Image (cartoon, rainbow, N blue to C red):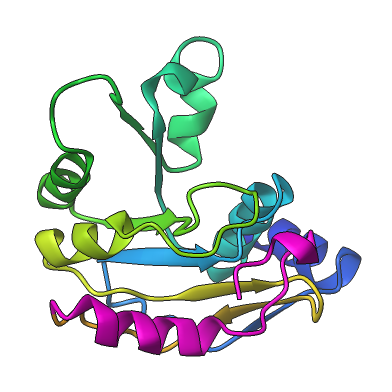
Amino acid sequence: MKKKLYEYIFFKLMGWKIVGEFDTSIKKCVLPVVPHTSWHDFYLGLLTRGCMNMEINFVAKKELFAFPFGYYFRWVGGTPLNRFTNENKVDAIAKIFQEKEVFRLAISPEGTRKKVTEWRTGFYYIALKGGVPIVPIGFDWKNKQVIVFPTIHPTGDKEVDFKILEGYLKGIEGKIPENSYL
């Protein structure tokens, strides 16, 4: 029933489509979602995962998980992250992959909704350290489509892997086009 509601809102009311196929046998992965230019990306992501009927997760500062919003953020797939400990954030997030049976981490490589000239590398090293593939996702607001790109298994050669990722995501416009990455 919920899936039908998500589909009605996403496809019929909003006029969006999903391009590409997600291999549902992948239970653990990093999903870099590009571009991230607006808070609207959050609900677009929730609707997309609802249409795909998949568990897709995110991490956020632990302060967001306090009452009264903590229950909601956990319910929609959030995992709290303590940003003030001495633990390396890449290590802390990679550890979550070991602790959970299903963990598909959606993350913004830009690290902000503002214009950036290069991606942060944490998502890449999380995948590498967690031993999980990368499934790039494009939120193309101009053409109203969410694009699921082919899975990449990080090689450890960041420069080569980033060229592939950037090639997939080149030209995709965010909700605020001037803040789009490429």
Q: Is residue 170 magenta?
A: yes
Number of residue marks: 0
Question: Percent x, y for residue 78?
Answer: 42, 38
**Depth check: 165 or 11 in front?**
165
Residue placed furthest toward the right: 13
Q: Is residue 147 magenta?
A: no
**Depth check: 36 or 16 in front?**
36
Q: Which residues are magenta?
A: 156-182
Question: Percent x, y for residue 107?
Answer: 43, 55
Query: Residue 144, can we see it?
Result: yes
At horizontal 66% and vertical 54% (from top left) the residue drawn is 41
The image quarter containing residue 54 is bottom left
Q: Is residue 109 above or below residue 38?
A: below
99 sits left or right of 104 in the view: left
Query: Residue 2, can we see it?
Result: no
**Depth check: 163 or 6 in front?**
163
At horizontal 45% and vertical 13% (from top left) the residue drawn is 66
93 sits left or right of 35 in the view: left
Q: Is residue 43 above or below residue 138?
A: above
